[in-house]
Image (cartoon, rainbow, N blue to C red):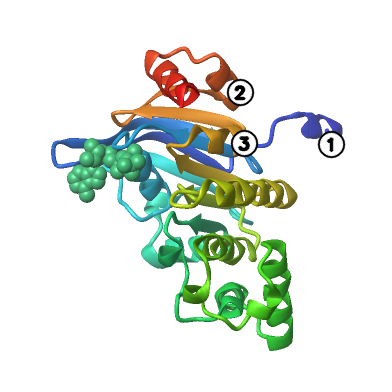
Amino acid sequence: MGAINKLLPKPPLLHVCGLSKSYGGQVGCLDISFAIRPGEVLGIVGESGSGKSTLLACLSGRLEPDAGAIVYDVHNRGPMDILAFSEPERRRLARTDWGIVHQNPRDGLRMDVSAGGNVGERPMAIGARHYGNIRAEAQDWLRKVEIDIERTDGTPNTFSGGMQQRLQIARNLVTKPRLVFMDEPTGGLDVSVQARLLDLMRGLVRELGVAVIIVTHDLAVVRLLADRLMVMQRGRVIEEGLTDQVLDDPHHPYTQLLVSSVLQV
Ligand SMILES: Nc1ncnc2c1ncn2[C@@H]1O[C@H](COP(=O)(O)OP(=O)(O)OP(=O)(O)O)[C@@H](O)[C@H]1O
């Protein structure tokens, strides 16, 4: 039985079914269904207004969907309908199991708290108490995201945009979440800074085996990071599949347009 289990695909970490959200008469996202397995990276692409942010906000508990189910395999408890969670239960899940990397590091960091504090307060929030260990772990993570540990006591507003984004990533990964939501994590950065950040993220995601849902309009980002891709247009998923397959052989005319518009640049 054990040998057979190893051959079977891992059960989904997150299972989304028929998720919809509108704003008055305006469709945000419509009838979205997908599953993501542990350690898998799912990219969601589409032009501005296609519903990416609405979907991500519904998944990460920042927005209440109008319809659908979100089932998450909660650590030590099993698959649960998280839309039925109370607010404290949802906050606890976000603190222990999830990470959220925002496009603007200011939304994900505490700008008046030191870099070491920004990383260290996450393990503290889930029970770490020994100051020396917390600081050592924070510095270990600063090193991993290539921030000089001499900057441990500096605040993020003295950091460059790229450093702030790397700090936000360290703050999210330090507690080894099982699922991380990323919203345009490389947006607003110089191309060379983006490339370095992407390399770093790819290494860390693979090393930790964390599942990631990454929303972006940048096909180069998903090409490098995502195992699977969903393409959205006007709130719906119009194409999905393995990233290379979708990008190298797009079937839907809208995906073909997206891919060809990048190739022309
Ligand atoms: N607060 C809101 N009130 C009304 N309509 C909204 C609101 N937020 C989003 N929408 C609408 O929902 C649709 C999806 O928007 P959403 O922001 O999810 O798209 P997006 O793909 O994330 O776009 P972008 O890449 O520009 O962030 C759009 O038509 C948008 O105008």
Q: Quadrant of the N terminus?
A: top right
Q: Secondary structure at mark 3?
A: helix
Q: Which residue appears at 38% of the width and 52% of the height? A: 84
Nearest the camera: 264 or 4?
Answer: 264
Task: Indicate which label's residue lies in the foreground, 1 or 3.
Answer: 3
x and y, in percent, of residue 42 in the image: 55, 37
Q: Which residue appears at 61% of the width and 23% of the height? A: 244
x and y, in percent, of residue 217 in the image: 42, 37
* Residue 156 seen in render: yes
Q: Which mark is residue 244?
A: 2
Nearest the camera: 30 or 68?
Answer: 30
Kind of residue at badge 2: Asp
Q: Which residue appears at 70% of the width and 31% of the height? A: 9
Q: Which mark is residue 40?
A: none
Q: Is residue 217 above or below residue 111?
A: above
N-terminal-most mark, 3 or 2: 3
Residue 11: image quadrant is: top right
Local packing at callout 1 (Cα closer than 10 Å; few below 14, some 14-19, many 20+) is few
Q: Which mark is residue 224?
A: 3
Q: Which residue appears at 61% of the width and 58% of the height? A: 177
Residue under numbered circle 1: 2
N-terminal-most mark, 1 or 2: 1
Q: Is residue 176 above or below residue 130?
A: above
